[in-house]
Image (spheres, rainbow, N blue to C red):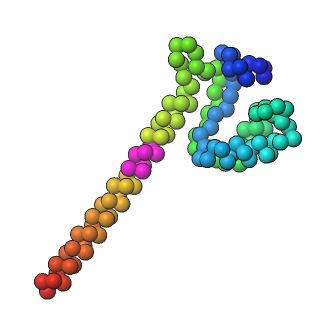
Amino acid sequence: MNGCLQSAVCNRLAAWVGLFENPRKIESATHRHFKEFRTRGEWFRVSAQEAIKTIQNISTPLYEEHVQSRIANDRGTRFSFLDKVKIHKIKKGLLELIFQLIFAAIAVSLVLFLLKNLIIYLTG
């Protein structure tokens, strides 16, 4: 199985994928947690369930999915996860845009209020 995973030649794989804020921090914490189970490089002798549980305890995923047999093939089939990542990025971008518009509306209202009061003060 290791040869299959390391060479990325397999066409069937069961995996768990997650979308996290600050993935490098989570990876470092996971490596520290499993340091006594390291076999070589990025490989650790732990069950998938134990690894998933540990990662979920370190940080709450923004999105997660158990993926089975959805590896990209020569026709370009992609993980459904990648589509969900794109949707998440679009939602995040739209939310940021909404906050920017709200901030701009507040700023314009404040400027109009100040101008109105300045005109009243100057003409008053």
Q: Residue furthest bottom?
A: 124
Q: Seen from this angle, which residue lies furthest right?
A: 36
Q: Residue at x 42, y 49 (%)?
A: 95
Is residue 121 found inside the magenta-colored segment of the image? no
Q: Is residue 95 magenta?
A: yes
The N terminus is located in which quarter?
A: top right
Q: Residue at 37% across / 55% down in the picture?
A: 100
77 shown above or below 96: above
Residue 48 lies in what quarter of the image? Answer: top right
Which quarter of the figure is the C terminus placed in?
Answer: bottom left
Q: Residue furthest top?
A: 74
- The residue located at (18%, 84%) in the rendering is 121
Task: Judge left or right: residue 69 versus residue 1.
Answer: left
Q: Quadrant of residue 13?
A: top right
Q: Is residue 45 visible?
A: no
Q: Quadrant of residue 40?
A: top right
Q: Is residue 64 toward the left or the right of residue 92 in the image?
A: right
- Relative placement, left or right, of 73 versus 119 is right
What percent of the width, then of the height, locates residue 43?
A: 79, 32
Q: Which residues are magenta?
A: 91-97
Q: Is residue 68 above or below residue 97?
A: above
Count how many numbered circles sit on residues in the image.
Answer: 0
Q: Residue furthest left?
A: 123
Q: In the image, residue 112 lies at what x, y percent?
A: 23, 69
Please name whichever residue, 112 or 31, is drawn nearer the observer in this view of the structure. 31
Residue drawn at (61%, 47%) of the image:
22
Image position of 29 with respect to 79: above or below: below
Horizontal and vertical percent position of residue 37: 85, 37
| Residue 98 coordinates in the image, percent (x, y) | 37, 52
Q: Is residue 82 visible?
A: yes
**Dominant secondary structure (helix, strand or loop) of the stretch shown in magenta:** helix
